[in-house]
Image: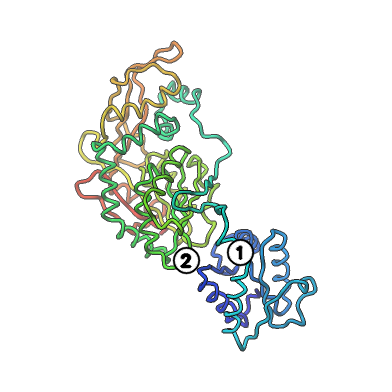
């Protein structure tokens, strides 16, 4: 429709009439993203279930946009207060006449037209799920993928180990053994760090989400989980987000992980938690974090603010400061970021869980490439920190001896875990350009929690 003051009351009437049917109406000036407005209009038309066009005043932009809607086979309802002057190319289409002096009548007739629309009829009877849609026992398997297949490479693993470089954490979850062992570790009551963080989220989720929504300025947000793990913490956060939602809009959940297997586990966990799934959309992304910027157009699918979440540990994803800077650059002003990380305390590795499970997890990439190694020989020792955050303490899984393709290797560090100092983390936040809006160091627990926004 034309963006003119004369049409404001017409637009309000349309929005109210369709809201009564549980539908959301979007006009181009409602879309708060930075892309060119014409691109926003095309995207909105493509995503719409039905397009309403107001052809009054013979506006050429409206005519052009309706032509695009017909090109992409969208059902349309056309309104006019001037039937004799309907544009020539649109005269063969049915129009709903209205008068600005009887907008209540327009609302009533529009609802009746909508009830006869193919769009609502298909909503009542359709057998195919929309992208990302969730039913009680079924979810549409919408996956976005990086073009390069993120599989562990024997050559790359060998090269890293020969260079005495610690392996990237993503390798822990890219093999079937690594995925299965990690999930078993999450079930281990001795894995105190994980059990504490689950308990913390359970006890503090209302305060955490309250701080997030206060900053976002909206009760409608989308949730991007970077490394969702087994999905248990995500489920608690999503449940609370859905409880706060006040309209028929959906909440979109974007689990993002380099491992397709872990994504599937997280989605299944969400499905099993008896959430109000009819208001949830799930779109998974299988990609390395280095491709995160490539998926911004996916995250910005809607105008609602995004909540980014890193609850698996900041050190799981490489250089921490570079990652924080990347997230800062991606985020819009109303977005926020949730972070969980291990707290620097004591002299030993805290709350690691059953030693055999940890050893099996850390050795998964070595076994994947066919190395001969004694699981019982894996040690966990402090090493010179490889963290980009000052004063972090680093514990590494170390193998004193192993063999591969007839060659012997000695004293190899596989994977490391960082423990952070709260004061240093805050300095990094300030350096990157973040402001803390929620924080809790958990007292005696082994983790730090923050919610931050762009300063």
Using the image, determine if residue 31 lies above or below residue 98: above
Q: Position of residue 394 (x, y in %)?
A: 30, 34
The furthest residue to the right? 88
Residue 311 falls left or right of residue 175 = left
Q: Splitting the image into 4 quarters, where does residue 247 fall? A: bottom left
Q: Is any part of residue 321 visible from this angle?
A: no
The residue at which mark 2 appears reads as 248
Residue at the image position 71 percent from the left and 80 percent from the top? 57
Between residues 145 and 32, which one lies in front from this camera angle? 145
**Tag 1's secondary structure?**
helix
| Disc 2 crowd, CA 10 A, few/some/many (<14, 14-19, 20+) | few
Q: Which mark is residue 119?
A: 1
Q: How is the image coloured?
A: rainbow
**Marks 1 and 2, how far apart in space?**
17 Å
Q: Position of residue 70 (x, y in %)?
A: 71, 63
Using the image, determine if residue 434 lies above or below residue 246: above
């Amino acid at each position: 429709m034309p963006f003119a003051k004369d049409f404001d009351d017409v637009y309000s009437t349309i929005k109210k009439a369709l809201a009564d049917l549980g539908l959301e109406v979007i006009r181009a000036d409602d879309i708060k993203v930075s892309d060119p407005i014409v691109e926003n209009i095309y995207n909105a038309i493509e995503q719409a279930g039905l397009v309403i066009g107001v052809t009054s005043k013979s506006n050429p932009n409206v005519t052009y946009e309706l032509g695009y809607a017909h090109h992409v086979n969208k059902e349309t309802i056309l309104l006019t207060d001037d039937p004799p002057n309907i544009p020539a190319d649109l005269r063969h289409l049915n129009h709903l006449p209205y008068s600005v002096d009887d907008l209540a009548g327009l609302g009533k007739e529009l609802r009746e037209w909508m009830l006869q629309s193919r769009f609502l009829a298909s909503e009542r009877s359709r057998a195919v799920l929309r992208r990302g849609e969730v039913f009680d026992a079924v979810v549409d398997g919408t996956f976005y993928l990086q073009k390069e297949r993120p599989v562990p490479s024997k050559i790359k693993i060998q090269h890293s180990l020969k260079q005495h470089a610690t392996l990237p954490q993503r390798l822990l979850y890219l093999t079937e053994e690594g995925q299965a062992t990690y999930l078993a570790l999450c079930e281990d009551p001795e894995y105190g760090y994980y059990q504490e963080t689950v308990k913390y989220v359970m006890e503090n989720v209302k305060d955490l989400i309250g701080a997030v929504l206060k900053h976002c300025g909206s009760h409608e947000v989308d949730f991007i989980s970077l490394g969702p793990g087994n999905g248990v913490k995500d489920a608690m956060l999503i449940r609370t987000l859905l409880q706060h939602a006040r309209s028929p809009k959906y909440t979109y959940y974007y689990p993002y992980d380099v491992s397709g297997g872990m994504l599937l586990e997280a989605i299944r966990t969400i499905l099993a938690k008896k959430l109000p799934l009819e208001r949830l959309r799930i779109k998974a992304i299988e990609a390395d974090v280095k491709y995160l910027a490539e998926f911004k157009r996916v995250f910005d699918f809607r105008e609602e603010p995004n909540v980014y979440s890193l609850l698996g540990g900041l050190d799981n994803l490489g250089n921490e400061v570079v990652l924080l800077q990347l997230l800062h650059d991606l985020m819009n002003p109303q977005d926020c970021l949730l972070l969980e990380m291990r707290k620097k305390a004591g002299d030993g590795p805290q709350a690691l869980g059953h030693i055999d499970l940890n050893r099996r997890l850390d050795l998964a990439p070595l076994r994947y490439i066919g190395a001969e190694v004694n699981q019982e020989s894996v040690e966990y020792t402090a090493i010179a920190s490889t963290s980009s955050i000052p004063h972090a303490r680093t514990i590494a899984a170390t193998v004193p001896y192993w063999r591969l393709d007839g060659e012997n290797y000695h004293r190899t560090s596989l994977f490391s875990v960082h423990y952070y100092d709260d004061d240093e983390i805050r300095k990094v936040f300030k350096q990157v350009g973040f402001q803390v809006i929620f924080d809790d160091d958990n007292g005696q627990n082994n983790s730090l929690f923050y919610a931050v926004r762009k300063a």
